[in-house]
Image (spheres, rainbow, N blue to C red):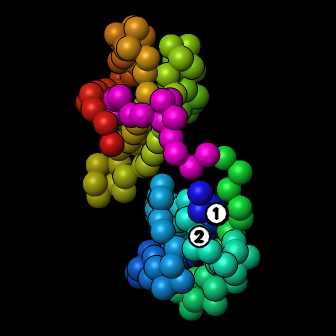
Amino acid sequence: MASVALVSVLGPDRVGLVAAIAEHLFDIGVNLRDTTFSALGAGAEFVALCELPSGVTADEVEAGLKRLPELDGAEVRAMPYAFDPSPGAAGSITHRIAISGGDQLGLVARLAEVFKRYEANIVRLEARKLPDAEGGLYVTRFAVSIPAAQTDPCLATVSNTAGTLGLNCEVEAGSL
């Protein structure tokens, strides 16, 4: 198996950031696996599992990324990845859930406890407050892996929790 590194970049958000990172990694022969990018306020975060070509180390990847002008002011790290890069059964997404409405302190904690109670694994999580010009809503999206025997009670509890807080809950079954 190829050597795998975790690459993370946290810095100011700017146009061309993903293009610069992806182009550099491509140029040195790195194959991207699981990859995420997110604007976080005025900042941005890029995280990827990268298959390194023979002879390329995580330290070399980090050093090369740090030289990119687009990453000026960013925190850049590349380190060997100690886990299996292939997702297990708990990494398969069975449902996507979107909760929206007013900002509710503790919402993520409450819903995470619901998922834990029903042995559901949170595969992806995104929470975002939309600008006032877009309605000022707080939107939380979960991509989860719910065991088949727990699906109905888990989804009912999630929906009831959202409803109790005056929030909308949309559920979509499926993968990816």
Crowd class of label 1 (few under 14; some 14 to 19; many from 20; radius 10 Å)? some
**Crowding near the residue tagged with mark 2, few <14, some 14–19, many ≥20 C-alpha atoms within 10 Å:** many
Looking at the picture, how far across and down is residue 68, in whole percent?
58, 89
Query: In the figure, 48 relative to 153: above or below?
Result: below
Quadrant for the C terminus, please: top left
Could you tell me which residue is drawn at 64 percent across and 85 percent down? 64
Please report the residue visible at 27 percent of the width from the left and 32 percent of the height from the top: 174
Query: Relative to residue 130, is residue 40 depicted above or below?
Result: below
Determine the residue positioned at 64% across, 63% down.
3
Q: Looking at the rendered structure, which numbered label has been put on residue 3?
A: 1
Q: Which mark is residue 52?
A: 2
Is 89 contained in the magenta span? yes
Coordinates of residue 111 in the picture (x, y in percent): 50, 24
Quick check: is 154 in the magenta stretch? no
Of residue 56 and residue 77, the one placed in the foreground of this image is 56
Q: Main secondary structure of the magenta part?
A: loop
Say which amino acid is labelled 2. Answer: Leu
Is residue 125 in view?
no
Q: Residue 152, image x and y in percent? A: 34, 10
The amino acid pointed to by label 1 is Ser
Quadrant of the image occupied by residue 9:
bottom right
> In the rendered view, does 108 fall on the left or right side of 168?
right
Q: Mark 2 touching mark 1, by CB under 8 A?
A: yes
- Secondary structure found at label 1: strand
Q: CA distance from mark 2 to mark 1?
A: 5 Å
Q: Which residues are magenta?
A: 84-96
Q: Secondary structure at mark 2?
A: strand
